[in-house]
Amino acid sequence: MKNKIYITVLTIVSLLNWSCTDLEEERLDESEFGGQAEKISGAIAPAYGQISSTFFITNYYGLQLISADEAILPFRGGVDWFDGGKYMSAHTHNMTPTNDMVTTSWNALTKNISRTLAAIEVLAPLSEEGSIEATGALHEMIALRAYLNMLLLDSWGIVLKKDSSTELSVVLRGQEAIDYIESEFLAVVDVINTDRGSGRMTQSAVWGFLARLHLNAPVYRDPYGTPNFTAEDMNKAIEYSDNVINSGLYSLSPEYFELFNDENRGNAELIFALDQRGVLEEEHSRWAYWSISKSMFPRPEHPSADGTDGPAITTSFYQTWVDAYEGVDPAEADSRFYQRNTLVPDAQLADLAGRTPLLETETENSFYCIAPEDFEMDRGILRGMQWGARKGDDGTFITCEDGTVKIYPIPLTKGNGPARDIGYVNHVLDIDFSIPGSLHDTGYRSAKYQFSRTSPDGNDFSSVDLVLMRLAEIYLIRAEAKLRNGDNGSALADVNLVRTSRTARPDQTPAALAAVDLDILFRERGFELYWEGFRRTDQIRFGKYEDSWSEKTDSDPNNRLFPIPQSAVDGASGIDGFLVQNQGY
């Protein structure tokens, strides 16, 4: 059996040439590695590049999103997104070890860990020979391995410790797993680079991950029980957060949605991100297009750019915004909720009474004209009627006399349901697994990420970096740690600093809060970090993962961790006690 495991490892290592040359084109500047540039960049490029597969929408990222209370993905109209029921079972916490979403997430993440090990095995001898460049790259790979193992610990409750590809991994759980991850970070935190930018592991990123580790350590020690938030853990979270904040390298972005735009690589709030330069086939606008309507064409200069009618905001998560602002539309009260970019020039255009897209009821007041490259869809949480370009019977966009495109209310042309071809895309709040509740227009949508303007077709080769850590999260980590230590005043100051920093649209800048407690802080993390993959972990830490929402009524604490894929358990079945299935599965 051990021989089979070694062969598997070697097979994974052999995949390292999967598209290194493409990745190195811009992401890694070989000039920084001196005479051993090709060997060093060739070692670390696959490890960084695999992150795109790890955070693929239907892999690790989607697993975090759909299992939490912020997103739901039903069997759309009985025709889309069933996929064996994996999304519905993830949302209702009824997953089994054969769930494909679990398996693909595990495989992508463990392959990513294997690639960091392969890079370390190349870089360590070069470092020992005195190569400064190799030593710097080695530090990055050690930090990246620790981060990836922390993702594994967060979702499956285990860490895979492995220092040589010829050895069998050691499976760690609980405090041993925490200690190992911490030791990896601490081994490099004082010597790793400080200036590589958000697309690479830096000292600030390591500090931030140490802060995140200590905030969640009480859950990782006892994933099925009630977390014990010790002062020691919280003080460490505060200490490492202080290091990031006091470094002076980062600042909060006045415009919230610029964090998720083209050119966000230069945004001073980003600490760690998946660097997308449009050089890898897997660098898509998936985080942008997964949720929005299939009838939406967000880049009229590219006829193939569209949405997928994937997950929507749950009614319960939306209600947290409504409850917080007590009768005031969240779009007016909080700039993080919504940004209007589709500027309908005349109120008459928004009056759709008596009109349908296929009847002879549309006039010159039914549309406005704009250059294709100037159109920008609305961002944030999309509700109600949506506006965008419309295609004619010939498959091309309908244009005005000057060649600009006509922007109409979007006709519902995709999926099944009574409104298809005779109604508009008009997102309603209620969404569930019933037939009417799962139609293609149900559910408010998340459009947090911009469709990349540098993409050759709108969907592929995006240049919008995927945000994995930013300064606002660090402030909220510090606020929570202080609050759990009893320092409510300092916690409130940190929360309000984040809330009131979004000043680019002052009429929608959230007002400062008068007080904060754990429920309000949980709510604020939801407002600031929604659709970024934090919600499941937050719900577990705040004791809310066993609550009910939309179609989910399960309250079994065993479901806080995902099942280890059956294929992984079977693969290790010849080694007694090596990979034990998580309890409850």
Image (cartoon, rainbow, N blue to C red):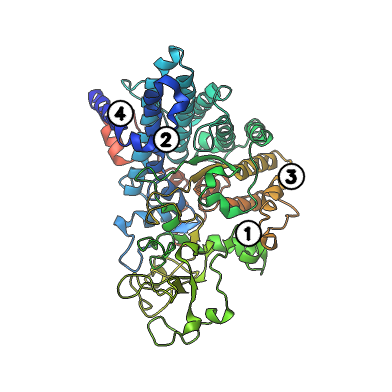
Going by the numbered disc 3, the residue's amino acid type is Asn
Who's the residue at 30% across and 73% down the image? 394
Distance from the alpha carbon under mark 3 to that under mark 2? 39 Å
User: Where on the picture, by quarter, is residue 27?
Assistant: top left
Q: How many numbered circles does the render carry?
A: 4
Q: Residues within 10 Å of mark 4 (few under 14, many from 20)?
A: some
251 or 154, which lies in front? Answer: 251
Name the residue carrying label 4: 13
Residue at mark 1: 335
Residue type at tag 1: Ser
* First along the sequence among labels 4 and 3: 4
Give the residue type at disc 2: Tyr
Image quadrant for the C terminus? top left
Q: Earlier in the sequence, mark 4 or mark 1?
A: 4
Residue 577's quadrant in the figure? Answer: top left
Report the front residue among 488 and 334.
334
Relative to 440, say whether 13 is above or below: above
Q: In the displayed structure, does residue 30 sit left or right of residue 249?
A: left
Residue identifier under label 2: 48
Q: CA distance from mark 4 to mark 2?
A: 14 Å
- Whole-percent x, y for residue 401 in the image: 43, 77
Report how far apart the C-alphas of labels 4 and 1 lie in the structure: 45 Å
Residue at 39 percent across and 55 percent down: it is 459
- Cα–Cα gap, marks 4 and 3: 49 Å
Q: Are marks 2 and 1 in contact (CB under 8 Å)?
A: no
